[in-house]
């Protein structure tokens, strides 16, 4: 069985600048462009957030930050319109501009 070491075998022949550039390129390869929402999608997102807030329902937010997307689940405790943030009951805060989707997690 042949065991290939991938890029490790070539590192001895590469300049440190090349290794650095390869690492940066590999890191940027996973970047995600921010989803753009139109006016209708923003209106629906706003309505879903308000309904979840008034019903104290658990929501799952899809967020975009630093060229990556992630999800956060919790119950909305407050909106701060002046700062443009939304807070969960556990203290986590998210800026409005990073939210691009809201779903209600299924209860099993």
Image (cartoon, helix red, strand yellow):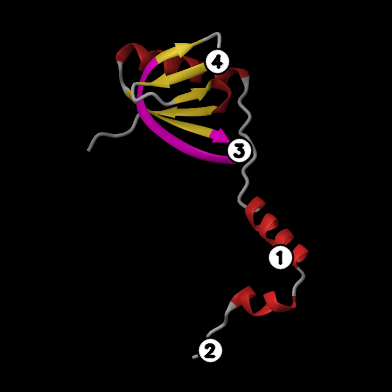
Q: Which residue is mark 1?
A: 19
| Circle 1 or circle 3, nearest the eye | 1
| Spatial separation of the CA atoms under disc 1 and disc 2 | 25 Å
Query: Earlier along the polypeptide chain: callout 4 or callout 2?
Result: 2
Q: Which residue is mark 2?
A: 2
Q: Which mark is residue 84?
A: 4
Q: Which mark is residue 66?
A: 3
| Spatial separation of the CA atoms under disc 4 and disc 2 | 56 Å
Q: Secondary structure at mark 3?
A: loop
Image coords of residue 63 (percent x, y): 51, 32
Depth check: 12 or 4 in front?
12
- Answer few, some or many: residues within 10 Å of disc 4's Cα (few below 14, many 20 plus, some between 14 and 19): few
Depth check: 100 or 64 in front?
64
| Spatial separation of the CA atoms under disc 2 and disc 3 | 39 Å
Total numbered circles: 4
Q: Which residues are magenta?
A: 64-77
Is 76 contained in the magenta span? yes
Residue 12: image quadrant is bottom right
Q: Secondary structure at mark 1?
A: helix
């Amino acid at each position: 069985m042949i065991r290939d070491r991938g890029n490790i075998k070539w590192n001895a022949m590469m300049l440190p600048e090349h290794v650095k550039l390869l690492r940066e390129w590999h890191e940027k390869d996973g970047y995600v462009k921010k989803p753009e929402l139109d006016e209708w999608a923003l209106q629906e997102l706003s309505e879903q957030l308000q309904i979840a807030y008034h019903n104290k329902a658990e929501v799952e937010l899809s967020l975009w930050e630093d060229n990556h997307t992630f999800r956060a689940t919790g119950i909305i405790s407050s909106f701060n319109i002046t700062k443009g943030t939304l807070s969960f009951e556990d203290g986590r805060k998210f800026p409005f501009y990073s939210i691009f989707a809201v779903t209600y997690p299924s209860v099993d």
